[in-house]
Amino acid sequence: MTDLFDQKRSGTSITIERLSQRFGQNTVLDGIEVQLDAGQVLALLGPSGCGKTTLLKLIAGLLPVEKGQGRILLGDTLVAGDGHFAPPEARGLGMVFQDYALWPHMNVGRNVSFALEMRGMGRKQAMLRVAQALEIVGLKGYEARNPSSLSGGQQQRVALARAIVARPQVLLFDEPLSNLDRDLRESLCHEIGALLREMGTTAVYVTHDQEEAFALADRIAVMQGGHIRQLATPELLISEPASVLVAEFLKLGTLLEARHVPPSWHPLIAPVVNPQHLFIPQSALSFAHGQAANHDLSPETRQLLMSELRGEVVAQRFRHGRFITQVRTTAAPEGLVLATDARLQTGQIIDLALDWQRLRWLPQAA
Ligand SMILES: Nc1ncnc2c1ncn2[C@@H]1O[C@H](COP(=O)(O)OP(=O)(O)OP(=O)(O)O)[C@@H](O)[C@H]1O
């Protein structure tokens, strides 16, 4: 389309080694390790206060890495740690923030061209690049507009154009969509994902929104309390959460305290010290329409499962074209969670089929 896109695979790898950050007595990041390949998109996903923005600022050079607190490399270049500190402008970055951070006294064209002008690029060439960047984000011809005359979504597109115009090797996003309404968030999220893939730029994307992370990222770091609890592809996080913490945070299914006596599992009636946890992904359960499933199980196990897996529908909500259904069973008084195509009545008794192969035993901590 344009020569911005001709810079295919222009991203660089990111390596973060043993990175920690303290503010006073407060350890905000603790032993962070990341290896991200060139052109990949990493989402930092976690609850408020878990350290996502701090990690992004350290990558950006907006915060220095304290002595002995780890290293950051972009490609083969050490940019922070071991006595090195490359300022943000020397790191080849583009940044997009939650609040757009456009300069209100400059028109759209100047906002986008500013970084190019600072680098001494001639005005004619800069304006050509600006036009390309605006076209890419769907704002062709908007150069003369004032930011205040644009909608929130359009302002964020300008911010995106400003971030990509200088062909950064790494793009950093800090909750860029959280000020936008839901529909716009979804469509812009999709567009950013497509753009990143097209440009081949490496990106780190901070969000507390699971759907954004799963829609955009090649890899997701689930953060909590200054730690990365798991860094994996979206598919692996769904099928193999590394711990109870990750499975609980992502709400991907049901966690049961249980006792594992292979090949069977037994729900715990009374609490015990250090129970094991059985993770039942939503995808492991289906509405059996009264038919017995699990033919590959031993008769004893099948009997146990089938007797336990008849339950009462306690709640349903609609999400992404399916009904997320909570079913109370003897084994899971809190309710098993599955997705169904059918709308069911509260109080209805249904049979569930369980794909035994998808169950996982999880350790308590990360
Ligand atoms: N400059 C600072 N001085 C002192 N404490 C700080 C500073 N910056 C961040 N913190 C603290 O570090 C912790 C992590 O903050 P951070 O902004 O990285 O979290 P976050 O995961 O991005 O949260 P949110 O989603 O709410 O933005 C918080 O407890 C915060 O109060």
Image: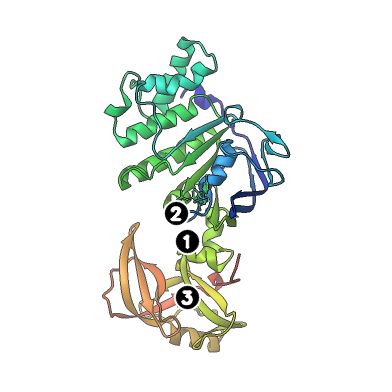
For the point 48% across and 70% down, which residue is it?
284
**Callouts 2 and 3 close, C-beta under 8 Å:** no
Q: Secondary structure at mark 2?
A: helix
Going by the image, does 307 lie left or right of 322?
right
Q: What's the residue type where badge 1 is placed?
A: Leu
Label 2 vs 3, first from the N-terminus: 2
**Callouts 2 and 1 close, C-beta under 8 Å:** yes
**Callouts 1 and 3 close, C-beta under 8 Å:** no
Label 1 vs 3, first from the N-terminus: 1
Q: Secondary structure at mark 3?
A: strand
Within 10 Å of disc 1 (Cα), the crowding (few <14, some 14-19, many 20+) is some
Dot in front, 2 or 3: 2
Instruction: Using the numbered discs, state the Cα–Cα distance from disc 2 to disc 3 in whole angstroms.
Output: 26 Å
For the point 42% across and 52% down, which residue is it?
211
Residue that mark 1 sits on:
250
Instruction: Using the numbered discs, state the Cα–Cα distance from disc 1 to disc 3 in whole angstroms.
Output: 21 Å
Instruction: Using the numbered discs, state the Cα–Cα distance from disc 2 to disc 1 in whole angstroms.
Output: 7 Å
For the point 47% across and 51% down, which residue is it?
214
Going by the image, does 20 lie left or right of 1?
right
Residue that mark 3 sits on:
354
Q: Position of residue 39 (x, y in %)?
A: 58, 38
Q: What's the residue type where badge 3 is placed?
A: Leu
Label 2 vs 1, first from the N-terminus: 2
Q: Position of residue 196 (x, y in %)?
A: 50, 36
Residue that mark 2 sits on:
210
Q: Secondary structure at mark 1?
A: helix
Within 10 Å of disc 2 (Cα), the crowding (few <14, some 14-19, many 20+) is some
Q: Is residue 68 above or below residue 125?
A: below
Please name whichever residue, 52 or 198, is drawn nearer the observer in this view of the structure.
Answer: 52
Q: Position of residue 263 (x, y in %)?
A: 60, 82
Q: What's the residue type where badge 2 is placed?
A: Gln
